[in-house]
Amino acid sequence: MRVALTGGLIADGTGTDLAPGTVLVEGERITAVLPPGEPVAEADVIDATGNIVAPGFVDLHSHADFSLGSSPAAESQLAQGVTTLVAGNCGWSPFPITDLETLRAGTAFLGPKHEWSWNDLAGFAATLQPAVNLALQVGHCTLRIAAMGSAKRPPSPEELRTMQDLLRAAADQGAVGFSTGLIYAPGAYASPEEVAALVATAAECGLLYSTHIRNEGAGLLAALDEAIAAARVGGAQLEISHLKAVGKANYGLVEAALEHLDKVDDVDLGWDAYPYTATSTTLTTRLPTWALAGGALLDRLADPAERKRIAEALRADALLSPDSVVIASLPPGRYEDSRGLSLTEMAQRDGVDAAEIVLRILESHQAAVSVVNHAMSEDDVTTVLEHPRTAVASDGWIMDATGPGHPHPRNFGTFPRVLGHYARDRGVLTLPEAIRRMTSLPASRLGLSDRGVIKPGAVADLTVLDPHRIIDNSTYDDPWQLSTGINHVLLAGRPAHIGSGRVIS
């Protein structure tokens, strides 16, 4: 199949100025970039007049491994121009499996609709027929569950070796990275020494180390140092996930964080960010990690003394911010009509305080509750996006165009929001530079030299976008809105459709 994309301006993914030309594709690869007007014989023509032809966008941080299996069409992603999703982030992956029930409980907040018919990466990948490419990482929380369940203690030498062996096996089957989520139990129970040992194994295997660091508030700089030290010990390439500062008392701290990161010259590191002032996570992250030990949270909530202890810890936590925490999704139960309400609104409705409403929600919905947390400063978001080493990433997992709940708008609008709101409308960065941050920059973090760029020999994952119309439409109040302005998406030279993507390594 021969395709010519003609009449448009080419953004080659490197950040250079837009230039007119024709992109010629034969089979799965780009074969030439021709001057404008040069005739092309015997090719299907895509008229890109008035549009920008860019590499397909590479999302370094997603949780699509928990959703693509049941939503392979990836409508929300193709409407953003995304052609490659990197999954297995924040310490969670749907493999390897030795303790299925504990893993299912730990990942329930992501709402997976899996059949769980596999044990390892290869088995999982064989079940997929996605419309976009998927690169898989293996998660530390999942490894810990496989080796030692939800125990709140250091691993034995044998358990650590089990985690390392499972990590090596995933690498052999095509994993591109190893991730930690050090605010999530059981990953939060790991010492820096445990993490460093596993990062060294990941480096041995040539894997990227992606980390949701241990603290994104007042302890941000110390948490960055922990991540850097772990990467330094083993010589790993480091990716700091969704760099930000959470909590009003910490607004402005991202400037010091960026200065700190820029001074590191002995670790290959990068970071990513999403263009929103709210996070999205599980409600259990509001709890002290000891409350989740052993997977026994619901048992503790049923014990009056333990319940009181958890409530007291919540009342002492200045970061709870009940006005800012909004219910996104939860399984059937007592509060299923409360999606889109804040903890404050729900507490007022029940006539209790914020700590008590958190416990009631968790116990009524199997502790599988996702929230949107309005906890960041717009100035900080802009500061991080301005930095030339910041890759754009969504931290999303919703693949469908419609559905239940009140999910974060980043699932539907991350990439068009950067291109439309931050680049075109606000001038925070240029359009070619914005495109670089979502193409060649993230591709380079994965060592994908033949993706994220428009050049002869590169894989023909391409996006055609209207620079005047590109915009996110999803909002916190009305999230189920696809972005507009993406006119064509090609996967390996063919129009994207279910089954056109692949698991890449």
Image (cartoon, helix red, strand yellow):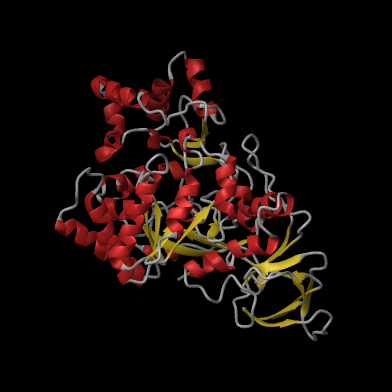
- Residue projecting furthest to the left: 157
Position of residue 323 measured from the top left corner of the image (x, y, whole percent): 52, 26
Q: Residue at x 36, y 46 (%)?
A: 104
Taking depth in this image into account, of 430 and 127 the one nearest to the observer is 430
Dividing the picture into quarters, in which one does residue 153 lie?
Answer: top left
Position of residue 239 measured from the top left corner of the image (x, y, whole percent): 43, 59
Drawn side of residue 420 relative to residue 207, left or right = right
Drawn side of residue 473 relative to residue 89, left or right = right
Look at the image and tell me in which quarter the C terminus lies.
Answer: bottom left
Residue 408 seen anywhere in this rendered image of the structure: yes
Count of labels shown?
0
Taking depth in this image into account, of 317 and 413 the one nearest to the observer is 317
Taking depth in this image into account, of 228 and 50 the one nearest to the observer is 228
Drawn side of residue 73 relative to residue 313, left or right = right
Taking depth in this image into account, of 368 and 100 the one nearest to the observer is 368
Q: Residue at x 31, y 62 (%)?
A: 199
Position of residue 205 measured from the top left corner of the image (x, y, whole percent): 33, 71
Look at the image and tell me in which quarter the N terminus lies.
Answer: bottom right
Dividing the picture into quarters, in which one does residue 340 lie?
Answer: top right
Position of residue 299 measured from the top left corner of the image (x, y, whole percent): 27, 29
> Quick check: 139 above or below 133?
above
Dividing the picture into quarters, in which one does residue 341 lie?
Answer: top right
Q: Residue at x 57, y 60 (%)?
A: 388
Residue 131 seen anywhere in this rendered image of the structure: no
Q: Residue at x 54, y 58 (%)?
A: 390
> Quick check: 495 above or below 413?
below
